[in-house]
Amino acid sequence: MIYLTGYIAHDGSTLVNFKADLDAYEGDHIHVEITSEGGDTDHAFAIYNRLTKSSKAVTTIANAQCCSAAVLVFAAGTTRVAYPNTTFMVHEFSSNSEGSTRRTRRAMDQQLKEQLLYAKLLAKNSLLSEQKWVKLMNEETYFNEREALKWGLVTKIL
């Protein structure tokens, strides 16, 4: 079992530790248990890419909290399991962009592209459309494991 817990750090530590755990993982089926409030989306995309490009079957398991960027990591599983009493949350991307108006605008444009990609990947791994995920993100939506199962994001509740 690989554990992804806490904040997905922008300093790279979460990604480095996850990559090391994944590279050392033995067996033909990867299990990733996630208890995370989210964090840096760039690193969540990198973890998603590593999991979806693996030649091994991947089961992601949400336990208690799977929010923000962690939802994308969860979506990477070919099987997506949630414990009872798990809270999920999606929201608009946020930014700490500084600098000139032009630089800030470019950063926001890129952020919107990444947010649409996030919605597209959630749609690919659920029954909801990309547009519905965008709407849920814009409304900062909390949902439980039963709703996630109904939406096809969760494939099984433990």
Image (cartoon, helix red, strand yellow):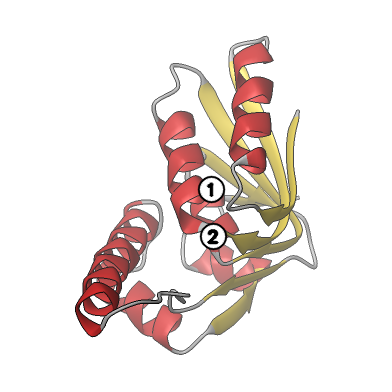
Asked whether 65 or 41 is in front, the reply is 41
On screen, residue 46 above or below 157: above
Residue 99 visible in the picture: yes
Q: Dots 1 and 2: beta carbons under 8 Å?
A: yes
Q: Pick the residue in front: 92 or 82.
A: 92
- Relative placement, left or right, of 78 versus 111 is right
Q: CA distance from mark 1 to mark 2?
A: 7 Å
Question: Amino acid under label 2?
Answer: Ala
Along the horizontal axis of the image, is 112 left or right of 118? left
Residue 80 location in percent, x, y?
A: 58, 46
**Three-letter residue code for mark 1:** Val
Question: What residue do we see at 49% from left, 54% from top?
Answer: 72
- Disc number placed over residue 73 in the picture, else none: 1
Going 50% across and 47% down the picture, which residue do you hit?
Answer: 43
Write the residue at 54% across / 60% down: 69
Horizontal side, residue 109 vs residue 5: left or right: left
Residue 13 at x, y = what percent? Answer: 66, 40
Q: Is residue 149 above or below residue 1?
A: below
**Residue topped by disc 2:** 69
14 or 101, which lies in front?
101
Examine the image and state in which quarter residue 134 appears. Answer: bottom left
